[in-house]
Image (cartoon, rainbow, N blue to C red):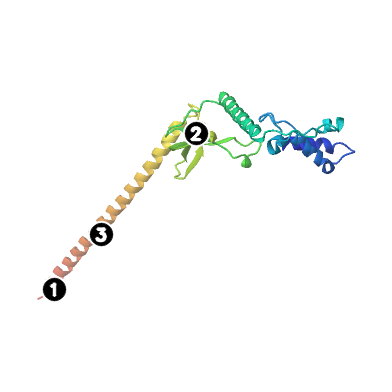
Amino acid sequence: MRTLKSLLTIIENDPNKTWRDELPEVQLALNSTRSRVTGYTPTELMFGIRAQSLGISRLAPSAEPEQRLDLEEVRSIAAENINRAACSEVERFNRGRATVKPFSTGDYVFIKSSERNQTKLHRKFRGPFVITRVLEHDRYELRNIDGSNRTYKYAHENLRAVPRGYDGLVDIATSLTNYEEEAETAGQGQEEMERVSSDDESETVSVDGCTASSGTLSASEQDEP
């Protein structure tokens, strides 16, 4: 597609030509161009024909217009060339690839911000987050250190490790976690105290009621002759 756009751009910049009129010649040029990967032209792989380019056909119009090739042999060689090129590309990619250091549960990381929500001055990463679970295929489950229970799932390539000594991040995260646990424990303790206090008040009211009843009964007995 990139080659096609380049050819059409060149034609369009010629004041004497339009790309619509030149499409047949562009198509013939592409189909007659030998691929660096396969070693053959698209015409040779599709039809087993070695077509002449535009320049040769114009210089030697009486020459043999096409040459027949063994289609099975051509395609077999092209497949081998493709596999060889693919292996070479994988090796080249792996040579320049950085060694991935996996994260562990409890590690603190930043999440790469989505490009569609970024401006030029927007931060490239957000967080920090803590890893709560290691998933398969280099994926992780994360949770914000603000104490919320919402979890996120991200691939390793979208995460960056928090530098050591990042403004006491570990202490802050630990404090937030402890605060959350203490708040939950305190809430349960407060509920227990309120329940006990309510029971004590009920018992006091019952005792006072019995005492009042006894006093009334005694007063009634004294009034009798």
The disc, 1 or 3, on the residue closer to the chain's N-terminal end is 3
Residue 202's label in the rendered image is 3
The disc, 1 or 2, on the residue closer to the chain's N-terminal end is 2
Q: Nearer the viewer, residue 211 or 90?
A: 90
**Which residue: 43% across, 32% down?**
104
Amino acid on which disc 1 is placed: Asp
Disc 1 packing (10 Å; few <14; some 14–19; many ≥20): few
Give the SS element for disc 2.
Answer: strand
Give the SS element for disc 3.
Answer: helix
Q: Are marks 1 and 3 in contact (CB under 8 Å)?
A: no
Amino acid on which disc 2 is placed: Val
3D distance between C-alphas at marks 1 and 2? 85 Å
Where does residue 178 sit, x and y in percent of width and height?
39, 38
The residue mark sitting in front, 1 or 3, is 3
The disc, 3 or 2, on the residue closer to the chain's N-terminal end is 2
Give the SS element for disc 1.
Answer: helix
3D distance between C-alphas at marks 1 and 3? 32 Å
Give the quarter of the figure containing the N terminus.
Answer: top right
| Residue on which disc 1 sits | 223
Report the side of 68 relative to 180 (left or right): right
Q: Nearer the viewer, residue 106 or 53?
A: 53
Quarter residue 105 falls in:
top left
Give the quarter of the figure containing the C terminus.
Answer: bottom left
Disc 3 packing (10 Å; few <14; some 14–19; many ≥20): few
Residue 109's label in the rendered image is 2
Q: Residue furthest left?
A: 225
3D distance between C-alphas at marks 3 and 2? 53 Å
Q: Nearer the viewer, residue 220 or 157?
A: 157
**Which residue: 20% across, 61% down?**
207
Amino acid on which disc 3 is placed: Ser
Where does residue 63 sit, x and y in percent of width and height?
83, 31
Where does residue 40 sit, x and y in percent of width and height?
69, 31
